[in-house]
Image (spheres, rainbow, N blue to C red):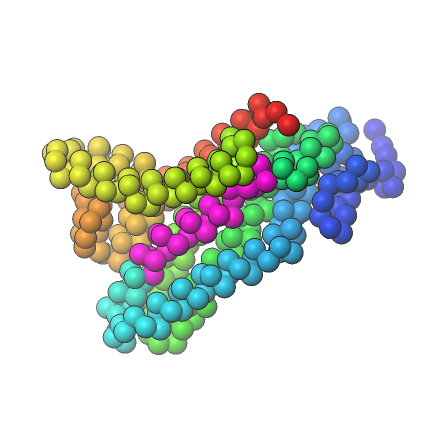
Amino acid sequence: MTHDASDEQRIPDDGRAQPDGGYATVAGTAAPDGERAGPRQVFAVAVTEYRLAVRSRWALALTALFAAFALGLTTFSGASVSPEGFERTVASLAVLAVYLVPLAALAFGYDAIVGNEEIGWLHALFALPVARRWVVIGTYLGRAIVLASAVVIGFGIAGVFLLREFGFAGFEVYVGFLLSTIGLALVFLAIGVLLSTVAAEKTHALGLALLAWAWFVLVHDLLALGVTAAFPLPDWAVSLLVLANPAGIFRALVLGALGAGGDAGFAAILTEAGLSAPVLTVALVAWIALPIALAASLIRRRRL
């Protein structure tokens, strides 16, 4: 089946879905081309989400936020110029990231679906022959590129200053921290998109996002620390406690690379879990994939 190039639908300049257009080649993928329609639709939605995030200054705001806090901490940390000082600075950045990055990611993702529904964009988009699951996946990917870029640039600027101060000795630790921070950001963005899919209103999604941040960043580790202190848990149970929290996985990855597993708080039991870096990395990827897969499934039940 063939069609003219004039029938191919393209992204308008303002990035919004239009009754006569919408997303590039979304409606132009015919049934015989169905196997390739999904990736095309995902790409079109992702490009649009990326453009909207850039135009709405989200990209600039996130980058400035991460850079300001990272530079402030590295500038005034007072660490000595030595490999030990470098590792202490990275450990301090990890403490900052585990609070700041999830909050920023949830704030960026909580309105991904319900916000577009409230402004009517989702209605126009679903009127096109686009599978709803591809809308969720494309929306996530577009915002994920923006968020990951903000993390790389924001914390990367601080990394340049650390490189000038400490040199290349131990810099691989900072690279590992940066990659772990990207993973942490993508996890909480996925959680935000999931909450946006199940919430009926933006205010509900915002409330759920704040509760999710409080649970994963604050409450879970306190409860886990109390349980491990009160009961002699086997290693597999301690491992499950770590893997049940993406923030705990991030701490385990970064502190494990620094050799600081037993410093303080819930981090003191990370070395007892016996989790290797590959296992923690796979767990972090699973925390990204599962919320998006669940959101892609639940979006079919959403009534507009």
Query: Of 227 and 5, which appears nearest the observer?
Result: 227
Left or right: residue 36 versus residue 250 is right
In the displayed structure image, the side of residue 114 where residue 246 appears, left or right: left
Vertical comparison of 254 with 224: above or below: below
Question: Where 149 sits versus 169, above or below?
Answer: above
**Residue at 43% of width from left, 71% of height from top?**
160
Q: Horizontal placement of 271 versus 106: left or right?
A: left
Q: Residue at x 52, y 36 (%)?
A: 196
Count of picture labels:
0
Quick check: can you spot residue 271? Answer: no
The part of the image, by quadrant, that contains residue 30 is: top right
Q: Residue at x 51, y 48 (%)?
A: 108
Is residue 111 rendered magenta in the image? Answer: yes
Residue drawn at 25 percent across, 75 percent down:
80
Residue 177 seen in the current view:
yes
Residue 275 included in the magenta stretch of the image: no
Nearer to me, 22 or 213: 213
- State the residue in front, 119 or 38: 119
Question: Which of the image's four quarters has the C terminus?
Answer: top right
Between 41 and 220, the one lying in front of the other is 220
Main secondary structure type of the part rendered in magenta: helix
Work out which residue is located at the far top of the displayed protein and give it. 301
Stretch of the chain drawn in magenta:
93-115
Q: Quadrant of the N terminus?
A: top right
- Provide residue 82's location: percent of width, then percent of height: 26, 73
Quadrant of the rendered image containing residue 229: top left
State the image coordinates of residue 269 (x, y, percent, origin top left): 19, 44
Q: Measured from the top left, where is residue 24 in percent x and y? A: 74, 42
Residue 27 in the image: x percent, y percent? Answer: 76, 34
Residue 265 as seen in the image, left or right of residue 61: left
Quadrant of res 18: top right
